[in-house]
């Protein structure tokens, strides 16, 4: 079973993604902090990541770079979730690293479609 990492400081959003992803036959681990999520990547083999961009303690791009240092293959299936409407730093990061972005609020079909795309890539 493929494992998916979910990093979001909003427990309700993280849990919603976990429940949905688990129902699709994957195993999702949820972390509300950067440190815990990075430790988990060091200890587990994840297939993909859903990560919030704006969190009180860090931003998703910083988590991306830490994950890429540990597992460059995992970084290829990194999806940023954001509620930011306009953010030049995020836009620059996304275009530079070719990271997928989901805008909040989102429909669960968007999550499913991205997972399906990664499965067939």
Image: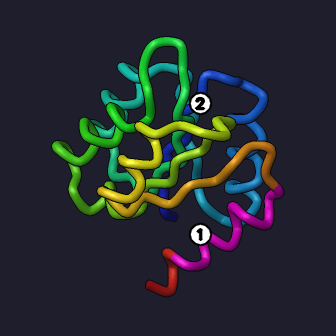
Q: Would you name the residue on which mark 2 appears?
A: 8
Q: Would you name the residue on which mark 1 appears?
A: 115
Residue drawn at x 41%, y 53% is: 94
Viewer-closest of 33 and 99: 99
Q: 86 left or right of 74?
A: right
Of the numbered discs in the image, which one, if any, rests on residue 105? Answer: none
Is 38 in the magenta?
no
**Which percent across, then down, holds residue 11?**
71, 24
Most prominent secondary structure in the magenta stretch?
A: helix
**Which percent across, then down, holds residue 14?**
68, 35
- Quadrant of res 104: top right
Q: Is residue 1 above or below residue 116?
A: above
Q: Is residue 10 above or below residue 1?
A: above
Viewer-closest of 1 and 24: 24
**Which percent across, then down, holds residue 114?**
60, 69
**Which percent across, then down, holds residue 7?**
53, 34
Residue drawn at x 55%, y 27% is: 54
Image quadrant holding the C terminus, namely bottom left
Label 1: how many residues lie within 10 Å, few (<14), some (14-19) or many (20+)?
some
Viewer-closest of 109 and 96: 96
- Magenta range is 107-117
Q: Which SS class for mark 1?
A: helix
Is 114 in the magenta?
yes
Label 2: how many residues lie within 10 Å, few (<14), some (14-19) or many (20+)?
many
Residue drawn at x 50%, y 86% is: 120
**Gap in angstroms between the C-alphas marked 1 and 2:** 18 Å
Q: Residue pushed farthest top? A: 57
Q: Which SS class for mark 2?
A: loop
The scheme the figure's colours follow is: rainbow
Contact between labelled residues 2 and 1, with CB atoms less than 8 Å apart: no
């Amino acid at each position: 079973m493929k494992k998916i990492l979910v990093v979001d400081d909003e427990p309700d959003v993280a849990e919603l993604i976990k429940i949905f992803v688990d129902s699709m036959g994957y195993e999702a681990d949820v972390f509300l902090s950067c440190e815990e999520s990075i430790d988990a990547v060091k200890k587990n083999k994840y297939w993909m990541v859903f990560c919030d961009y704006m969190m009180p303690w860090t931003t998703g791009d910083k988590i991306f770079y830490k994950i890429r240092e540990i597992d460059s293959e995992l970084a290829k299936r990194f999806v940023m979730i954001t509620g930011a409407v306009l953010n030049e730093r995020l836009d620059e990061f996304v275009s530079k690293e070719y990271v997928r972005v989901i805008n909040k609020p989102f429909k669960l079909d968007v999550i499913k479609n991205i997972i399906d795309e990664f499965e067939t890539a």
